[in-house]
Image: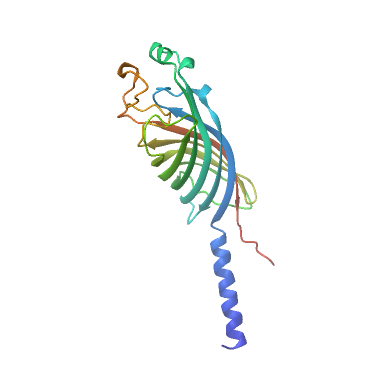
Amino acid sequence: MTLSKKFLLLVFSLLSVNTFAQKIEIGGGLGVMNYKGDISPDFHPAFARLGGNLLFRYNPNKIVSFRSSIVLGSIYGDDSKVNDSFNQLRGQTFKTSINELNLITEYNFFDYKYNRYHKDWSPYVFGGLGLIKFSPRDTPVTNYKTLQVVIPFGIGVKYNLAGPWDINLEFGARKTFTDYLDNLGGDNPALPKNQQNDYSRGDMYYYTSLSLTYKFIKVYCP
């Protein structure tokens, strides 16, 4: 291969990488996890616990984005803090750590792309598929699986702070297929039947986060 052909190949390779890089975004954030299940039948803000996330986002166009995230945190609940006689009588409490890996598709309601002449923003919705590994603080009440599939979905807002820096505010729910996030499933030998909830409904958890992201933007040189 001649020197000129090698040079052209190198140029095309760099252009290709540069074009692809404009679509890549990385970031991380902090937030809170909350839980809905046997101990907390309704959303209970007092049970919120700290969580964190790292994300990789690919933006093929202004409307749709694809994202992969790692989310780490914990969920908590206490019957004694729920204003219900059933919960007060049972008196159970739990804390469970959550490790989540997900693949998510986002839909931006407005065209969202970096523009050096103005700041951009857009609300968005998202949905996808995830895998969680959860670990209860207490000894498991039965031999249940702690590796589970979840369905993440929710809403958010993206806002361009300056240049390649964006901020994302997001509220998401996770539909699970287990009733043992709270270590209190419907088949708990430690409790009488009249103190066990409907295990067929399954537990859910929520993650509210604020993330800072960096977008790799092509720099035009004169």
Q: Nearer the viewer, residue 38 or 44?
A: 38
Q: Nearer the viewer, residue 35 or 12?
A: 35
The colour mode here is rainbow
Residue 15 locus on image (x, y percent): 57, 69
Quick one: quadrant of the C terminus? bottom right
Residue 72 locus on image (x, y percent): 53, 40
Question: For this view, does 106 lie left or right of residue 218?
Answer: left
- Number of callouts: 0
Q: Is residue 100 above or below residue 18?
A: above
Question: For this view, does 48 lie left or right of residue 219?
Answer: left
Quick one: quadrant of the N terminus? bottom right
Residue 131 locus on image (x, y percent): 42, 45
Q: Is residue 37 above or below residue 16?
A: above
Question: For this view, does 155 lie left or right of residue 164?
Answer: left
Q: Residue at x 51, y 45 (%)?
A: 70
Q: Is residue 122 above or below residue 186?
A: below
Q: Nearer the viewer, residue 160 or 199?
A: 199
Q: Residue at x 45, y 41 (%)?
A: 133
Residue reaching furthest right?
A: 222
Residue 89 locus on image (x, y percent): 41, 12
Q: Is residue 171 above or below residue 37?
A: below
